Image (spheres, rainbow, N blue to C red):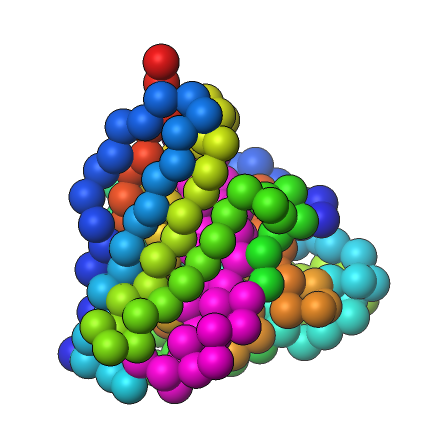
């Protein structure tokens, strides 16, 4: 199972919006509406930000949103804040009770 | 409150085995699965597999098949992950996470650093 493809890094200024892509195949991202996104600050455990492509867990800011088109899922963060600087990982169900993560994207808030 | 508390750091020699524990509290243990995810130094997250705490069913990542075993002890609400025939590239922080849906992990343990070195 190959890792999903994410850009290594993205950046934006406070207040701007950024989008992180996550490209897979029809066997994972494109085949199921089970894509989640995790935020990870250095030295910390990951935190769930989006699940089932576009749903937000309770307590997660509505500045975070998710979408999917074909084999590519996307995470958009609007109104960037300094605390959003972190690594972001997508995760997709890949059938037969298996999962696959993306390689991760480092978000820098300029 | 939901908590997953993992066992402490381990240092192992190549070829040895390691068993990491993950003690759950604050919820009905058998109502959710536990997944294990690892992260090599400076690298991304890698899904290792998961176990149903309800019936013990497991699914492992293909690359770890034959080397990994996940178990649970429902009497103590603890999940375990054993990795055998350790290699240097198994050096990583190992996380347990509560799985509540297909690709949804809502609570994570604090991580356990496993170092494989001769």
A9 relative position to A99: left or right: left
In this picture, is A43 found above or below B21? Answer: above
B95 relative position to A72: left or right: left
Magenta-span inclusion, residue A57 = no
Closer-to-camera residue (A90/B14): B14
Question: Magenta span covers which residues?
Answer: B29-58
Q: Position of residue A3 (x, y in %)?
A: 66, 46
A95 relative position to A21: left or right: right
Give the tally of numbered discs.
0
* Residue at 31% over, 49% down: B20
Q: Position of residue B33 (x, y in %)?
A: 44, 74
A47 relative position to B46: left or right: left
Query: Which residue sits furthest top?
Result: B118
**Residue B98 visible in image:** yes
Q: Quadrant of the C terminus of chain A?
A: top left
**Which of the 4 image quadrants contains residue B14?**
top left
* Residue at 25% over, 34% down: B10
**Residue A67 visible in image:** no
Q: Position of residue B93 (x, y in %)?
A: 35, 40
Closer-to-camera residue (A18/B45): B45
Closer-to-camera residue (B78/A79): B78
Q: Position of residue B118 (x, y in %)?
A: 35, 13
* Residue at 35% over, 40% down: B18
* Residue at 74% over, 54% down: A24
């Amino acid at each position: 199972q190959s890792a999903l493809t994410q850009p290594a890094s993205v950046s934006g200024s406070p207040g701007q919006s950024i989008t992180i892509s996550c490209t897979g195949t029809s066997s994972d991202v494109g085949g199921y509406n089970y894509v989640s996104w995790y935020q990870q600050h250095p030295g910390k455990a990951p935190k769930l930000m989006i699940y089932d492509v576009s749903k937000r867990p309770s307590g997660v800011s509505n500045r975070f949103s998710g979408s999917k088109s074909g084999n590519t899922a996307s995470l958009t963060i609007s109104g960037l804040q300094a605390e959003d600087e972190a690594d972001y990982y997508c995760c997709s169900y890949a059938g037969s009770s298996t999962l696959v993560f993306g390689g991760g994207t480092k978000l820098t808030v300029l | 409150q939901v908590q997953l508390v993992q066992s402490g750091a381990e240092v192992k020699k190549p070829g040895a085995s390691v068993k990491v524990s993950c003690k759950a509290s604050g919820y009905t243990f058998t109502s959710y699965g536990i997944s294990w995810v690892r992260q090599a130094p400076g690298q991304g997250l890698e899904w290792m597999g998961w176990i149903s705490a309800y019936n013990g069913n497991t699914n492992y990542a293909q690359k770890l098949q034959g080397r990994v075993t996940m178990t649970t002890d429902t009497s103590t609400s603890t999940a375990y992950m054993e990795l055998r025939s350790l290699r240097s590239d198994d050096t990583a922080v190992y996380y347990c996470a509560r799985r509540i849906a297909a690709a949804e992990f809502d609570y994570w343990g604090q991580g356990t650093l496993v170092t494989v070195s001769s």
